Amino acid sequence: MPNTRKNKILAKNRDGKLGVGLGLVFPSAESIGLVGLLGGFDFINLDGEHGLFSPESIDEMVRTADGYGLTVTARVPNIQSSTINLFLDRGVMGILGPHVETAAQAKQLVDACRFVPEGQRSWGGGQGTFYNDGRLLDQPGLKRTEWMAATNKEMIVSAQLETALSFENLDEILAVDGIDAFAWGSNDLAQSMGLPGQPDHPDVKAAETSVQDRIHAAGRKMAWDMQTAINLPSLILDGAEAFAKANA
């Protein structure tokens, strides 16, 4: 078989379990090392839309995670192929595309993430494609297209539905092949529904429940059907609050 990274989330899913991850909003190779040593974690998620990540720091996060056998996923800033390439070429194996509102945008997301024939992913020369080294890609008896197909199988593509318009266009979005899971953006959804700052408003929650039911009825998944993650800031704040209270 081609020399490809294996997606730990998908491996856990095949065993009927959720992938367990740590979410980062800023670069922290040390945090990756700590959970890698601790064990029990499968992936690291980078918030590339609102977080503080450069291509260089993404590269470092992936290299560190690789050393501990952890998969890296990311929410990207936008669904432009040039943007997504910056993450995939570093070795990120799961992409959450924000603000997907139409079937055309859903197709654009898939095309950017998957190689042909499932998409139109551009070929790069970073660690995500083993630096385009023929000794790693063109193994005896194998074609590069086999490596591309194997990589497609390990890629997770998720669409973030975070506006009323995306909910209105759900049926058309669901008709697009290649999306593995869907997620919300409750704050942005509330704002688009005329309820700014009210992500827990009953109307927002009712809309999300209805759409989730429709997604499941169509045989599709939500992101939390595949994985669960805790954010590093939450861990720090929870621990700091507990420590402060214990020593007040």
Image: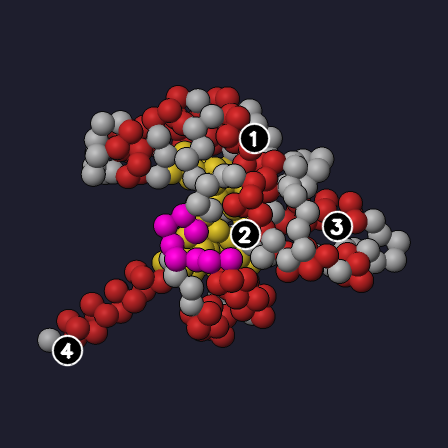
Of callouts 2 and 3, which one flags the residue occurring earlier in the amino acid sequence? 2
- Report the residue that reaches farthest toward the right: 141
| Residue topped by disc 2 | 87
Mark 1 touches mark 4? (CB < 8 Å): no
| Residue at 39 percent of width and 21 percent of height | 168
Q: CA distance from mark 3 to mark 1?
A: 22 Å
| Residue topped by disc 3 | 147
| Residue topped by disc 4 | 247
Q: At label 2, which amino acid type do we have?
A: Phe
| Residue at 51 percent of width and 53 percent of height | 73
Residue 54 on the magenta segment: yes
| Residue at 22 percent of width and 27 percent of height | 194
Q: At label 1, which amino acid type do we have?
A: Lys
| Residue topped by disc 1 | 107
Mark 4 touches mark 3? (CB < 8 Å): no
Q: CA distance from mark 1 to mark 2?
A: 18 Å
Question: Where is 125 relative to 189, above or below?
Answer: below
Question: What kind of element bears circle 4?
Answer: loop
Q: At label 3, which amino acid type do we have?
A: Trp
Q: Is residue 76 left or right of residue 151?
A: left
Residue 58 on the magenta segment: no
* Crowd rating for badge 3 (residues with CA inside 10 Å; few <14, some 14–19, many 20+): many
Of callouts 1 and 4, which one flags the residue occurring earlier in the amino acid sequence? 1
Can residue 15 be seen here? The reply is no
Of callouts 3 and 1, which one flags the residue occurring earlier in the amino acid sequence? 1
Q: CA distance from mark 2 to mark 3?
A: 18 Å
| Magenta range | 48-55
Question: What kind of element bears circle 3?
Answer: helix
Residue 196 location, x and y as percent? 21, 34
Residue 118 location, x and y as percent? 67, 35
Q: Is residue 125 left or right of residue 79?
A: right
